[in-house]
Image: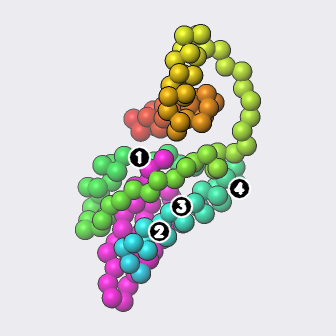
Amino acid sequence: MLYPIAIEKGTETEAFGVVFPDVQGCYSAGDSFEQALLNAKDALETHLELLAEDGILPPQSSNINAHVNNPEFSGWVWALVDIDLEPYLGKAGKINVTLPNLLTKQIDDLVKAHPQYKSRSNFLQLAAQHEIQGISAR
């Protein structure tokens, strides 16, 4: 999932500050722009790990366009941090799902043709996350 970040430009005496508008309480910094980006990913992974330990799902990310005109971040630089949320979603559990045969075949054919989908279950998980994010963004 892509999380937008706002990066406040640093100076010779101040670090570059990083804010995650969609992740309350998650901040980072770095002595250079590049270091701020690297530290941002580490900060987000640590934050999501702590949320998972408390049984809290990762927050949904919003489209970066929802934030770029926020006057609070005027003059800041925007970027995206890509995070695999699977490790922070809790233990996997089996469910029984009934789907039409032709839909199941389409899913299986797509999974076979696109190795980024590790399995039918992985495809269905990603599809569900995509739908949840889309509904949450409305």
Q: Position of residue 50 (x, y in %)?
A: 65, 60
- Mark 4 or mark 2, earlier in chain: 2
> Can you identify the residue that label 1 sits on?
62
- The structure residue drawn at horizontal position 48% and vertical position 47%, both measured from the top left corner, is 1
Q: Is residue 82 above or below residue 39?
A: above
Numbered range of the magenta stretch: 1-30
The kind of residue tagged 3 is Leu
- The structure residue drawn at horizontal position 30% and vertical position 49%, both measured from the top left corner, is 65
Mark 4 or mark 3: which is in front?
Answer: 3
Q: Residue furthest top?
A: 101
Badge 4 density bin: few <14, some 14–19, many ≥20, Cα 10 Å: few
Q: Position of residue 66 (x, y in %)?
A: 33, 48
- The structure residue drawn at horizontal position 60% and vertical position 63%, both measured from the top left corner, is 46
Comparing 86 with 120, the one in front is 120
Residue 22 seen by the camera? no
Tell me, for residue 38, which label it has, or none.
2
> Can you identify the residue that label 3 sits on?
44
The kind of residue tagged 2 is Leu
